[in-house]
Amino acid sequence: AQSVTQLDSQVPVFEEAPVELRCNYSSSVSVYLFWYVQYPNQGLQLLLKYLSGSTLVKGINGFEAEFNKSQTSFHLRKPSVHISDTAEYFCAVSEPRTGNQFYFGTGTSLTVIP
Amino acid sequence: DSGVTQTPKHLITATGQRVTLRCSPRSGDLSVYWYQQSLDQGLQFLIQYYNGEERAKGNILERFSAQQFPDLHSELNLSSLELGDSALYFCASSSSGLVQETQYFGPGTRLLVL
């Protein structure tokens, strides 16, 4: 089974500064990769996903992520954060060859400071 | 609003009891997923149904069961409840149940076991 590691449980960042949220997964087999965002008292919302093709994936709200197969990483970035980006961010992995199981990281709490 | 509805929003019950959580997927979606989010175990995939049939199973306890009905709504049954079952339970839906599809999450049911 996959394991997903989000290295930073909390990330404070000033408004308009860049941010990177890190995600590593355990297996180098073919995977699909996802980033989800959870705003307070809400369900999860998909930010972006990598299925195949270009390793740089662009998502909603100005976020992007880069798939690095050799480092088994899928880090999320945004060049300039806003107050409204304050939320919990989850990285998730699935292995299409083994079925529809999803494995989530423990989440990173992003706090944008005015 | 994702279009996925979950009832009830909150549920308080006692150890040993049984509860039923309900989920209505987005209009047109055939697949439903259940997740558990707790402080100690994070976000875990429980089970997936597609058009009434179980498609994938994750870390679902034997005390838990689910089903998807002909009208595509789904229910998650939790029995012999323990304190550790206190968590936020999410339902998500997708159109065809393929792992690469976007899942749309409901707002969750918060269960407290006393």
Image (spheres, coloured by chain):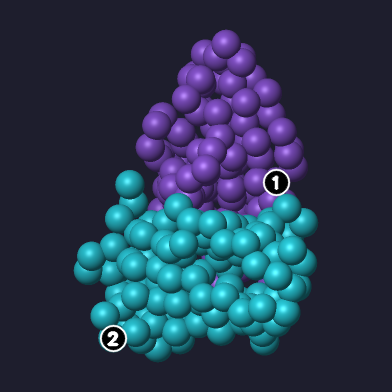
Q: Amino acid at mark 2?
A: Pro
Q: Secondary structure at mark 2?
A: loop
Residue occupied by mark 2: B70
**Residue in view at x 40 percent, y 32 percent:** A61
Residue B6 place in picture, x, y as percent: 42, 62
Residue A91 place in picture, x, y as percent: 59, 50
Of all chains, the one bearing label 2 is B
Chain drawn in purple: A
Left or right of B15, for residue B91: left
Label 2 crowd (10 A; few <14 / some 14-19 / many >=20)? few
Label 1 crowd (10 A; few <14 / some 14-19 / many >=20)? many
Of all chains, the one bearing label 1 is A
Q: Amino acid at mark 1?
A: Gln
**Residue in view at x 69 percent, y 51 percent:** A106
Which image quadrant is residue B23 in?
bottom left
Chain drawn in cyan: B
Left or right of B57, for residue A105: right
Q: Is residue B81 above or below residue B106?
A: below
Residue occupied by mark 1: A6
The lab-note entry on whether marks 2 and 1 share a chain reads: no
Residue A48 place in picture, x, y as percent: 43, 46
Left or right of B102, for residue A99: right
Instruction: Spot the residue most to the top.
Output: A114
Q: Report, in whole angstroms, how far the alpha carbon at label 2 lies from the one at label 1.
A: 39 Å
**Residue in view at x 73 percent, y 53 percent:** B39
Q: Secondary structure at mark 1?
A: loop
Is residue B44 shown to the viewer in this render? no
Residue A51 place in picture, x, y as percent: 44, 58
A68 or A113, nearer to the observer = A113
